[in-house]
Amino acid sequence: MDNKEPESPRRIPFDDREFKAGPFRQMLDQKFPFMKEMDIFGLAFRSEHERLASRGVASGYPQLDTEALIPAMEMGGIGADATKFLRGDRSWQPAPNTIKVAASVANSTEIMANVTGISFAVEANKTYTFRLSLKVGTTALTCGIFWQFTGPASPTSFWFNVKGWLSGPTAYEEEETAFSTPTSAASQATQLKSTIIEGKLVNGANAGTVQLQFCCEAAAETATVYAGSSGNWSKID
């Protein structure tokens, strides 16, 4: 008795190019026009020309970019550009920009000095928001820190809010509404504590740079903003 296994059916070579352009395809197009929009057996019925030509209609396909990705402008609604990110609700939102203190900055005077690293450039007639998380301290219990911002002349509006600590465990909060206007109360004790500063600028006709500044309450002591303090800012229109 012959125990040979039956031979597998012979595979017939299939050239999908002939299928796309041959008489069978033409017959399908005539009898079943709806099938032109379908992908039967993994075969793309629509040519690249057809795909590109129909981009302007709801059923069209977006053209991929040079990295084989869908271009940003094809992915969301109005307002897409290279400075924003696509959120889960398919709306385009400003991307936050990070700023930080790379090396601790100390000030032993009562004169305002820049907090190196905590600044950002602003354009004319644009709106910005920012939020900073700072680790700060002073060398004496009676010495606190004063804060202010410098920026472009004649903004439409500007405000910033500081949440920190007075000497000891007492919480402190103050808000100012102009550039080069320092907070009026000391905001730190000798312990290393956090200070949160947030604000908003609606800029006017002048471009410039928003810069955080600080000084010590008493000239004989030292105030320090420590490395690792950081924040972010966004242009919102």
Image: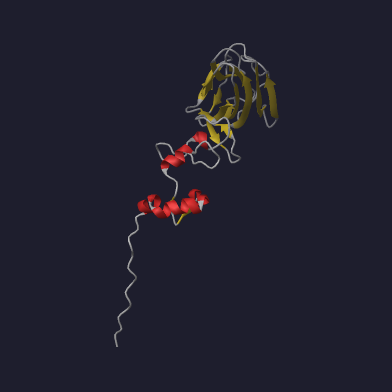
Is residue 211 in view from this perspective? yes
In the displayed structure image, the side of residue 171 where residue 57 appears, left or right: left
Task: Please say if 114 is above or below 72.
Answer: above
In the displayed structure image, the side of residue 14 where residue 64 appears, left or right: right
Model colouring:
secondary structure
Is residue 143 in view from this perspective? no
**Observer-nearest of 135 and 96:** 96
**Observer-nearest of 45 and 181:** 45
Quadrant holding the N terminus? bottom left
Where is residue 166 shown, x and y percent of the image?
A: 67, 26
Residue drawn at x 38%, y 49% as measured from the top left = 21
**Observer-nearest of 31 and 97:** 31
Count of labels in the image = 0
Where is residue 184 shown, x and y percent of the image?
A: 68, 18
Quadrant holding the C terminus? top right
Task: Please say if 70 is above or below 44.
Answer: above
Residue drawn at x 69%, y 27% as measured from the top left = 172
**Observer-nearest of 208 and 56:** 56
Residue drawn at x 32%, y 74% as measured from the top left = 7
**Which residue is outermost to the bottom?**
1
Task: Please say if 189 is above or below 89.
Answer: above
Q: Quadrant of residue 10?
A: bottom left
Q: Quadrant of residue 219?
A: top right
In the displayed structure image, the side of residue 168 where residue 216 appears, left or right: left
Where is residue 132 shown, x and y percent of the image?
A: 59, 28
Residue drawn at x 55%, y 26% as measured from the top left = 225
Where is residue 162 shown, x and y percent of the image?
A: 65, 25
